[in-house]
Image (cartoon, rainbow, N blue to C red):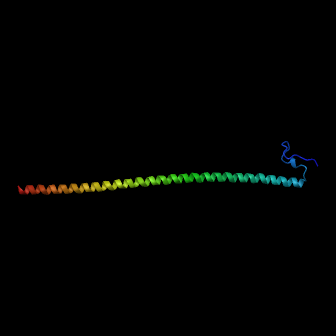
Amino acid sequence: MPHTDCNNSSDGPWERHAHLNPEVQQRIRKLENFETSFSMVLKAMSDSLRKNEARLSASEDRDYVKREWQQVALVVDRLLLFIFMLMTVGVTLGLLLRGTITYALAIQRSNIASST
């Protein structure tokens, strides 16, 4: 039985096993087909996992940005509430003081008018 070189590139994929029994050759072909199919499935799974990882990473980035903007919104909201409260208290005190001063001046004028 002549020795065939398995690394001979001129032989086709099945010819390197030509010296073997046809049943063994068929099993080898099935195994090679299985290896090819299994390799394709593993590659597809690997690609799917990479895409899923990229999607999760993008989702985490979006969630991080969302949380940061929520913090900014919370700070701005509290700042505007503080300004609103300060303005409300200022205007209320201003109106009360103005009314009190106006009332005091009116009484003072009536006292001056009644004494003359």
Image: 4 above or below 108: above
How many discs appear? 0
Residue 23 in which image quadrant: bottom right
Q: Quadrant of the C terminus?
A: bottom left
Residue at 27% of width from left, 56% of height from top?
92
Q: Residue furthest right?
A: 1
Left or right: 57 in relation to 1? left
Residue 97 point in image, percent of width and height: 22, 56
Q: Which picture quadrant has residue 71?
A: bottom left
What residue lies at 56% left-to-right and 53% top-to-bottom?
A: 59
Q: Position of residue 22 (x, y in %)?
A: 90, 53
Seen in the image, is 106 located left or right of residue 34?
A: left
Tell me which corner region of the image, top left, top right, bottom left or bottom right, holds residue 107.
Answer: bottom left
Q: Residue furthest left?
A: 116
In the shown orientation, is residue 73 left or right of residue 11?
left
105 vs 12, left or right, is left
Q: Residue at x 9, y 55 (%)?
A: 112
Q: Position of residue 76 (x, y in %)?
A: 41, 52
Q: Position of residue 77 (x, y in %)?
A: 40, 54
Residue at image coords 62%, 53%: 53
